[in-house]
Amino acid sequence: MLQTTKDNLISLFNKFLHENYGDFLFIDPDSIETLGKINAYADLFLPEHVLSIHLINKIGHVFYLEAENIYGYITIKGPEFNSALMQIKSKIAELNKSYILKIISYAGNYLAKIPEIRMAYTPMMEIFRSLDNNGNVILDTSRQADTKRIKFFSLIKHSGILKYEERYDKIIIYKNEDPGFKNDREMFAMTFSAIPEIFAANDSVKPYVRTAYSYYYFSIIHGDMIPLDAEILLRNYRHLFNRNIDELKFRSYIDSLIDCGIFFLEDGKIKGNIEIYNKIKN
């Protein structure tokens, strides 16, 4: 009897979802609660398409439904359509962000090799290089030349990569020996996993990470790495980020990701790094 009741609830919830919000929403049966009011969460099954492969990306618990049993009649309530749409968009954005942060965290030692990214973080690299050569760095808050270095240092000072002390108008920075960094490149690479949110917001890092995500997103949904042409990858990028990126610029991002080891070329097609793929899919 209990199973029949739950089956009836699932059917009623799904009918309500399809009539009010769309065919790609289904109730999560495991989320149904029947103590007091009847509550449940809706899951979104987002259709995706790459090459001739049809994929479904399940996004869990996009919004909440309530139901009441009044004299044997089930009344279901959910958010207004626009509110539901905003919650769905927010959930998709949250999912995209979580994967992008994973790529930055797990591919940091590869991203740190890209010359354009290193150039964008020149003041940070100057600090790391001086630490590597001298063991410490002294920044003077009153000196114009140190302004950018102090700005970049403020981004990483709580990351655990460095030790520092402040004395009046001086900031004295030391290498944190605990992680066992060998050189400035390793220190820079470590910052990606220590503070991925900082890099995700940087305009010099975004295009490379988004290009990488345009590959790994579809491979994760597929359950295996898919060899893709640059044209398909460009289409993925435009679909995911709703941006009409210049094709020549996009191909330069692909080349940089191949050079650093985030992508590989296999029979003329782009394929991912198995180490990165295995880490971000979990």
Image (cartoon, grey):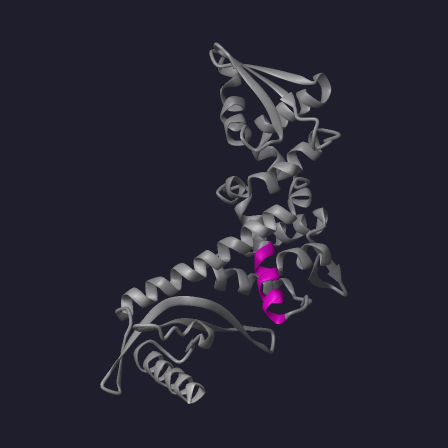
Query: Can you see residue 246?
Result: no
Q: Is 132 part of what is drawn in magenta?
A: no
Q: Residue at x 76, y 63 (%)?
A: 266
Say above or below: 187 vs 54.
above
Q: Residue at x 49, y 61 (%)?
A: 240
Return the residue found at the far left: 71
Q: Point out residue 262 in the picture as x, y percentages from the top left corner.
A: 68, 52
User: Residue 85: x, y in percent?
Assistant: 33, 67
Above or below: residue 189 compared with residue 246: above
Q: Eyeballing the image, is 226 above or below 263?
A: below
User: Looking at the image, which residue is at 67% across and 21% down?
Assistant: 131
The main secondary structure of the magenta stretch is: helix
Residue 115, quarter of the rendered image: top right
Left of 276 or right of it: where is 38?
left
Closest to the observer, 118 or 232: 118
User: Could you tell me residue 144's position as x and y percent?
Assistant: 48, 15
Q: Residue at x 62, y 23 (%)?
A: 127
Q: Is residue 200 visible?
A: yes
Q: Quadrant of the C terminus?
A: bottom right
Q: Find the magenta span and give its range.
A: 212-222
**Nearer to us in this view, 36 or 106:** 36
Give the mark count: 0
The N terminus sits in image quarter: bottom left
**Residue 214 on the magenta span:** yes
Quarter holding residue 90: bottom left
